[in-house]
Image (cartoon, grey):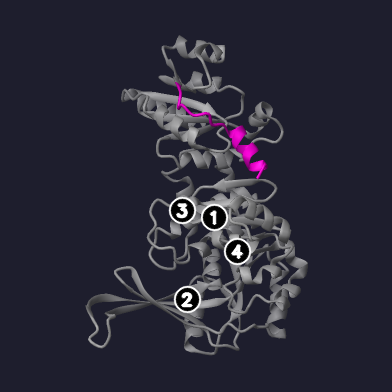
Amino acid sequence: MDRLLEILKEFPHRKITVIGDVMLDKTILGEVSRISPEAPVPVLSAKREVYGPGGASNSAANVSSLGGNASLFGFVGRDDNARILSEVLARNNTKCFFDENITTTLKTRIKSRNQQLLRVDYEDTSLKQFSPEVKETLRRELEDTDLILISDYLKGVVTEDLMNFLKQFKKRILIDPKPQNMSLYSGCFLITPNEKELLEMSGNREVYPAGKSLKEKLGCNVLVTRGEKGMSLFSEKEMDIPTYAKEVYDVEGAGDSAIAALSLSIASGASLEEAAIIANHAAGIAVGKIGTTQVKLNELERKLFGEERKLKTLDELSAIVEELKKKQKKIVWTNGCFDLLHAGHTKYLAKAKELGDYLIVGINSDSSVREIKGPNRPINSEAIRAEVLSSLSCIDCVTVYSEHHPIRHILALKPDIYAKGGDYKIDTINQQERKIVEGYGGKIEIINVGEDLSTTKLIERIRNL
């Protein structure tokens, strides 16, 4: 987790240039108490109107609210909606460079009690080209830009002309895509389709074959957003990243928040898996709010490192366990690689929690997994594995150890129960571990979930797809 904190600290020093379909979001809020006598439709008694950035504008606004430096390029008109949008973005410290030759795109949502009744769109979807003056400004902005974020809402901004202009920057381009423009994305660094878009772009019916196929077809990394299923990454390795939303109130703009956090993380030196973890946390914050919104850096820091953080160092755990034992709480310890979490793991961990009051899960570090399992493991890094385990309600704390066996942790924590999986027998457990646990009066419990499941078998099935 210290690594993720280092990444977030870099956000204020990073510049993201956002190019795409600029929109103004307008929400009319009110109450419905009757049906119109003119037609069978509800009558809204309007109470107030709220304006916010939409589309590429919201992606740029989220870059700014997360502490980054955002430059936004898009098309608006010489109209009141453009003026309102510029004022909204100025309050968020987002630099805007607009080509003013169309009618500003406006999305109006009508809501009652946070329920959307209707959406009305005013938009020009014809293909557009930036003027020579705006292109020259864009060229200057790109000279010190860390990453280019293209937000494609299929309103005519993302064209062959634009992508040819950006050709020399392709490996610094991250794209929120639309299937209809797939041919324009070839050779970029990363695209982030949702699951429906992925299947449409690849022609496959299942996520994993589709992700691998699209990665090869476009020659770029692919990060698939999957709603409550989290994200799936297709890069040098493939992995799933869980969602971190506790409650979903509104999905408006959550994708913009996620891609802004993703772009800033990559620009700050994060690996794709680290960036995906951070982006998923940002999306989890956004869906917990009402309406299109921006995620703030301090919110993201609290989400990652606040009270919800389950990953602990040995020193932190020692202090926690000392207090728990004063309260006569029973401590349960278990450990393993937990590379690809499956049903056998979750059933086992739920049963382990039932043995006591506080369940601590130790996971092998990446280096120790390689020593145990071979050079191609782990599939998921220790950061990913720790985050996945932390999302399980039955687990109270997670810690990482670098040795083959967690002897140092057992000696320090002296758990009341040491839980082991059903593939062990008492006489096959590491004798030093057994001697230590029994020596201080602890108990070893073997948990059998009654299913023949293993990560190795799961990996073989995936490789054979």
- Say whether residue 236 is left or right of residue 194: right
Which quadrant of the figure contains the N terminus? top right
Residue receiving disc 2: 88
Residue receiving disc 1: 279
Q: Earlier in the sequence, mark 3 or mark 4?
A: 4
Instruction: Count residues near mark 1 (Cα–Cα under 10 Å), then give few for <14, some for 14-19, many for 20+.
Output: many
- Which of discs 3 and 4 lies nearer the camera? The answer is 4
Q: How far apart are marks 3 and 4 (CA)?
A: 20 Å
Q: How far apart are marks 2 and 1 (CA)?
A: 24 Å
Q: Which of marks 2 and 3 is nearer the N terminus?
A: 2
Q: Earlier in the sequence, mark 3 or mark 1?
A: 3
Q: Distance between the residues labelled 3 and 1?
A: 14 Å
What residue is shown at x 40% (from left), y 63% (from top)?
Answer: 250
Task: Indicate the amino acid at tag 4.
Answer: Glu
Tell me the tag on residue 200.
4
Task: Indicate the amino acid at tag 3.
Answer: Glu
- Which of discs 2 and 1 lies nearer the camera? The answer is 1
Q: Where residue 464 appears, x then y in whole percent?
A: 67, 42
Q: Which of marks 4 and 2 is nearer the N terminus?
A: 2
Q: What element carries label 1?
A: helix
Q: Do the residues labelled 4 and 2 touch (CB within 8 Å)?
A: no
Q: Which of marks 4 and 1 is nearer the N terminus?
A: 4
Q: Where residue 171 appears, x then y in whole percent?
A: 73, 61
What residue is shown at x 60% (from left), y 89% (from top)?
Answer: 101
Q: Give the range drawn in magenta.
A: 447-465
Residue receiving disc 3: 228
Which quarter of the figure has residue 332? top left
